[in-house]
Amino acid sequence: MHIGPDTVVTFHYTLRDEAGVELESSRGADPAAYLHGANNIIPGLESAMVGQSGGDTFTATVSPADGYGLRHPEKVQRVPIKHLSFKGKLSAGDVVQLSTDDGMRTVTVTKAGRHTADIDTNHPLAGQTLVFDIEVSEVRSATAEELTHRHVHGPGGHHH
Ligand code: ZN
């Protein structure tokens, strides 16, 4: 079966940046799973999956626009440290929780001062060209329930 609309795809991936540095990998753990055509994964990877089938391996290079979006400089802002929740000493590179009017959100600290911190609310992979090594494990038809829920059930998917 080939990957196309309304198929469920189980796959292993290794994600690297343009310089070849590994960022994430599913290898050594359970494979990932997604419902094709439901925006479960980034657009650039989903379009590279079309027509592949179980056992296929390929490399997909995804531009920021088809990945996690461009980096927005205005998403770096200075906030009072009391708005951040963290333990111990705050340092650049820490991923912490920021309390906002809409609840808590995860941000990255770019600079820590005594009373304020500069934080980046961009997705950590925003602005990066992403290189995926993909190995398709299995392709099957989605169930009626999965199509209604717009996500995969069972291994690699939702359990409910
Ligand atoms: Zn569901």
Image (cartoon, rainbow, N blue to C red):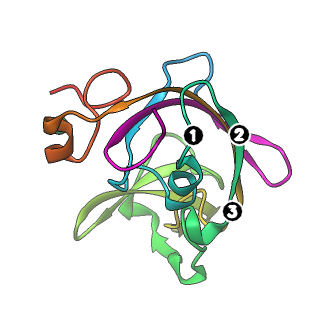
Q: Which residue is mark 2?
A: 58
Q: Are marks 2 and 1 in contact (CB under 8 Å)?
A: yes
* Tag in front: 2 or 3: 2
Q: Earlier in the sequence, mark 2 or mark 1?
A: 1
- Mark closest to the chain's N terminus, 3 or 1: 1
Q: Is residue 79 above or below residue 99?
A: below
**Label 1 secondary element:** loop
What's the residue type where badge 3 is placed?
A: Gln
| Segment colored magenta | 1-25
Whether residue 4 is in magenta: the answer is yes
Q: Provide the residue designation for mark 3.
A: 128
106 vs 144: above or below? below
Which quarter of the figure has residue 29? top right
* Nearer-N-terminus badge (2/3): 2
Outermost residue toward the top in this view: 28
Q: Amino acid at mark 2?
A: Phe
Q: Position of residue 65 (x, y in %)?
A: 59, 72
Alpha carbon separation for disc pair 3 and 1: 25 Å
Q: Position of residue 26 (x, y in %)?
A: 58, 27
Q: Which residue is mark 1?
A: 52
The label nearer to you, 2 versus 1, is 1
In percent of width and height, residue 6 lies at 31, 45
The residue that appears at 38% across and 26% down in the rendered structure is 156
